[in-house]
Amino acid sequence: MKRLIAFIVVLALILAGCSGAGNKANDKTLNVELPLKTTSIAPYDTDVPVKIGAAESLFKAGADGKIQKLLVKAYKQKSPTQLDITLKDDIKFQNGKKVTGQAVKASLEKSIQKSELVKGSLPIKDIKVDGQKLTITTKEAYPELVSELASPFSAIYDTSAKSDVTQAPVGTGPYQIKDYKQSQNIKLDRFKDYWQGKPNLEHINVTYQEDGNARTSDLASGKADVITDVPVEKEKELNKGDETTTSAVSGFRTSLLMYNHSSEKMTKPVREALDKIVNRESMAKNVSKGHATPATGPFNSKLDFIKKESVQQQDINKAKKIMKAVGYTKEHPLKLTVSTYNGRPELPKMAQVIQSDAKKANIDITIRNVDDIEGYLKDKKQWDASMYSFGTIPRGDTGYFFNQAYKPKGAINAGAYNNDEVTALIDKLNTIVDKSERNQLANKIINLTDKDLANSYLTYMDNIVGMNKKVSNLKASPEGIYLIDYKVDKK
């Protein structure tokens, strides 16, 4: 009898093991690798919660850059300072609580309180709530408010949730964050009551890998199912793979040489010389392997409201003459420190090309490749210029970039650019509602900052996403923000 009981117990354990293995085999887990580490996953600190399907904003940007309603049923810009919004009535946070007007008000106000970036992009004076209706009043005329409410940094989360928002924000997305290990990984589970329908995947596992070649190897080996920011030289390799493919689209991200205007070395003649040293067409063709377009300014020239300009041609001799006129020669070159980072794989290579060509114009560049570019740029004493990339127009309006990159206290104005005339024009832009007037003024600001050499804009970068062929309903988006939604699936 004892032998029979023992046999039954062993058999049960074997069957349970087989059953578990079967469940694991059928488990729909998507493994995603992202390049940039985060020390917080609060929506107001990073776009990662929106990218991986954990959080959503009131609005979102379409592939054409135009704003679409998301959590919003209806809205009206009643005046330059007042926006009326009616929320959809059937949306829940991932803890089961209803998304009410009061909850949205609390989320926006907390994000403004916690983030200088959000504070600058949402100059809100007051939010009045009546059930699902919100009346948002800004401190001054601010016609781009709807655009900024589409920002991933303005994503809505439950401020009353018990979890720490920097570790596990409770949003409205199709996947709920269950575990976060700083700068290592994020684990998410399906949110079954998601308002747009049942998500196809059961779990998502997000890890960080800053090295683009390592991300590519992980995708090829099957360790990762999806990777972002595919190195351009690896795109063909992944497309030829038996198990891998890519999705690429001309993007709204611009690569640039950011100037430190607080550095005594970075005079206008020096900036002008560096601008003439850059060979934009070669960078787009050779460094980016055709997955970029030469830049003429901060915004992708494919946008119909951007005035078309010719690409600045490389002129080493002219750059050399400019440097000689301000006292720099082969015997006494100008020494500059230029920072870069591996999160955007093409940038270090661009830095090397600029370094080589700059030497011909009597500029000796020391390249400093850093892990935490944002932290590094805060100390302006240690760099003169930096390779960088911005999503300059992720939501179809130039106001975001102008306010954050050109105003003295702009959240992404790491180079401390400051021009009173430009600031005044941006302030004027912030009061104009008419689209054609805004476009006309935007082009004027572009021309002024171009003459001022605020930065040197290099290329408009394609957004390339790599994935296993088992992954479906996922493709690259121009703004590079949205990646995982409830439709994404894995065979």
Image (cartoon, grey):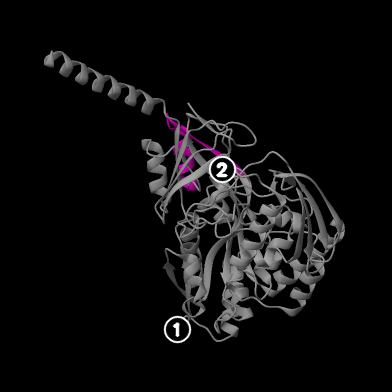
Question: What residue do we see at 83% from left, 60% from top?
Answer: 82
Question: What residue do we see at 64% from left, 64% from top?
Answer: 112
Viewer-closest of 325 and 133: 133
Tag 2: Cα neighbours inside 10 Å, few (<14), some, or many (≥20)? many
Residue 314 picture quarter:
bottom right
Residue 313 visible in rendering: no
95 up-or-down from 10: above or below: below
Residue bearing mark 2:
483
Left or right position of 132 against 436 = left
Viewer-closest of 83 and 93: 93
First reached walking from the N terminus: tag 2 or tag 1 = 1
109 up-or-down from 335: above or below: above
Q: Amino acid at mark 2?
A: Leu
Q: Amino acid at mark 1?
A: Glu
Give the magenta-colored segment's residue range: 231-249
User: Residue 391, position in %: x, y?
Assistant: 62, 56
Question: Does residue 247 belong to the magenta stretch?
Answer: yes
Question: What residue do we see at 44% from left, 38% from top?
Answer: 237
Question: What residue do we see at 75% from left, 74% from top?
Answer: 422
Question: Does residue 226 belong to the magenta stretch?
Answer: no
Say which element carries label 1.
loop
Residue lying at the far bottom of the rendered structure: 327
Residue lying at the far front of the rendered structure: 1
User: How many numbered circles are shown?
Assistant: 2
Q: CA distance from mark 2 to mark 1?
A: 51 Å
69 up-or-down from 9: above or below: below
Say which element carries label 2.
loop
Residue bearing mark 1:
331
**Quarter the N terminus occupies:** top left
186 up-or-down from 349: above or below: above
Viewer-closest of 100 and 153: 100
